[in-house]
Image (spheres, grey):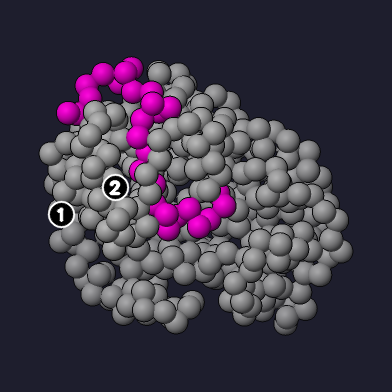
């Protein structure tokens, strides 16, 4: 039942299957709300042990010939759904952490839909995944939970197995047949009501309100096996550690690692009460929704700019490569960064309205359909490096 007519697929007419686990985050709930407003059929799987959800999906999928969009499903959820789709197919894959997606699905999907443009870039040959960067072999978990501890313990064995896994990746890349025109960009969203502008007196010079431990197994053949179970947020971790130590601790720094999980109001209060928010996309230079949130909250960023996405970000960030900068280099640059803070904050506030329009959930859904219908991604979303096939950031 695999569809052969790209023009026949209208996302408003598809059946969407979403992960209930992912929908605990507001940035994903906003898409769910927009789908419901468009009266689009949604089914939910709340983890691999959701027997009732699985049975509902199985019956609905096999009772219909609708194209299915699997949106934000996690690897163990995809594994659970495999019996439903192994013969039926007729689906597209919408991915968040695309490097973890199971290859059977990406191989047989009609469209590959990426929240992060770096997934499209590596398939177009514009760059390699985390090119020239490596996660440390020895790491300690940010949070003492089973997954983080197991990942740190598996890092060494994973590194030793990488040469053999890379050979397998080289092989299965040849099996992927999704053409470039069916690689679609579906960026993260932001809503005005989630990011109200408030004037908070500065309490901190810098804040880190993001996770500093990102451990994954690379299932996608375009992601490097050398990074299996490595901390892809190592650059962010280095940056917060260096900022905390700079000037013998004279800068006021909020560090999420030393705090409890922040509710949204607490999160906004910390961000808007900081001169800078630490922002990086990890060793893989990945787009994250926090870039948009920080800008719309009026707080400029310190961290790494992105190679392909968010052309407006250059006006809102003081660029520092957390992976390569030395403590001495960073300390010398901090006075300049603080001197530029006022102008960068002004830029954030001036860009706020355009960012909210570009990444509104309904606009992003329209953008997805426009690409499927053969249209180009309009200005405002991507940088020149994403447009020029001759450029290579590898």
- Residue drawn at (33%, 23%), measured in percent from left and top? 9
- Rendering quarter of residue 362: top right
Q: CA distance from mark 1 to mark 2?
A: 39 Å
Q: 147 left or right of 176? A: right
Rendered location of residue 366, percent (x, y): 51, 26
Rendered location of residue 80, percent (x, y): 23, 55
**Label 2 element class:** helix
Residues 379 and 62: in front is 62
Question: Label 1: how many residues lie within 10 Å, few (<14), some (14-19) or many (20+)?
Answer: few
Q: Which residues are magenta?
A: 1-27
Residues 247 and 76: in front is 76
Rendered location of residue 342, percent (x, y): 83, 52
Q: 79 left or right of 186? A: left
Residue where numbered disc 1 is placed: 167
- Residue drawn at (43%, 27%), measured in percent from left and top? 12
Rendered location of residue 320, percent (x, y): 61, 58
The reply to whether the magenta stretch includes residue 11 is yes
Residue where numbered disc 2 is placed: 56
Q: 352 left or right of 383? A: right
Q: Is residue 60 visible?
A: yes
Residues 280 and 39: in front is 39
Q: Is residue 75 visible?
A: no
- Residue drawn at (68%, 49%), measured in percent from left and top? 194
């Amino acid at each position: 039942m695999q569809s052969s007519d790209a023009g026949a697929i209208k996302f408003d007419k598809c059946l969407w299957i979403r992960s209930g686990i992912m929908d605990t985050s507001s940035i994903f709930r906003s898409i769910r709300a927009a789908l419901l407003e468009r009266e689009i059929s949604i089914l939910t799987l709340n983890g691999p042990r959701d027997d009732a959800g699985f049975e509902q999906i199985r019956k609905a999928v096999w009772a219909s010939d609708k194209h299915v969009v699997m949106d934000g499903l996690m690897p163990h959820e995809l594994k659970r759904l495999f019996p439903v789709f192994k013969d039926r197919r007729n689906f597209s894959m919408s991915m968040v952490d695309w490097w973890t997606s199971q290859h059977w699905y990406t191989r047989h999907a009609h469209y590959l839909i990426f929240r992060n443009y770096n997934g499209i870039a590596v398939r177009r040959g514009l760059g390699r995944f985390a090119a020239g960067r490596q996660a440390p072999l020895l790491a300690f978990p940010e949070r003492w939970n089973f997954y983080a501890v197991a990942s740190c313990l598996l890092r060494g064995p994973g590194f030793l197995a990488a040469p053999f896994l890379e050979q397998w990746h080289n092989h299965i890349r040849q099996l992927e047949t999704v053409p470039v025109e069916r690689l679609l960009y579906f960026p993260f969203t932001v809503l005005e009501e989630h990011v109200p502008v408030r004037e908070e007196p500065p309490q901190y010079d810098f804040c880190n309100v993001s996770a500093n431990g990102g451990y994954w197994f690379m299932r996608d053949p375009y992601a490097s096996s050398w990074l299996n179970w490595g901390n892809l947020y190592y650059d962010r971790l280095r940056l917060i550690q260096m900022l905390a130590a700079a000037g013998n601790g004279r800068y006021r720094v909020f560090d999420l690692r030393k705090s409890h999980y922040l509710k949204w109001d607490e999160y906004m209060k910390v961000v808007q009460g900081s001169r800078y928010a630490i922002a990086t996309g990890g060793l893989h230079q990945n787009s994250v929704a926090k870039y948009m949130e920080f800008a719309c909250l009026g707080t400029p960023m310190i961290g790494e700019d992105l190679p392909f996405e968010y052309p407006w970000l250059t006006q809102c960030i003081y660029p520092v490569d957390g992976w390569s900068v030395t403590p001495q280099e960073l300390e010398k640059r901090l006075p300049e960064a603080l001197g530029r803070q006022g102008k960068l904050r002004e830029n954030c506030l001036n860009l706020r309205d355009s960012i909210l329009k570009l990444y509104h959930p309904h606009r992003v859904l329209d953008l997805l359909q426009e690409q499927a219908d053969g249209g180009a991604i309009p200005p405002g979303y991507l940088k020149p490096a994403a447009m020029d096939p001759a450029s290579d950031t590898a």
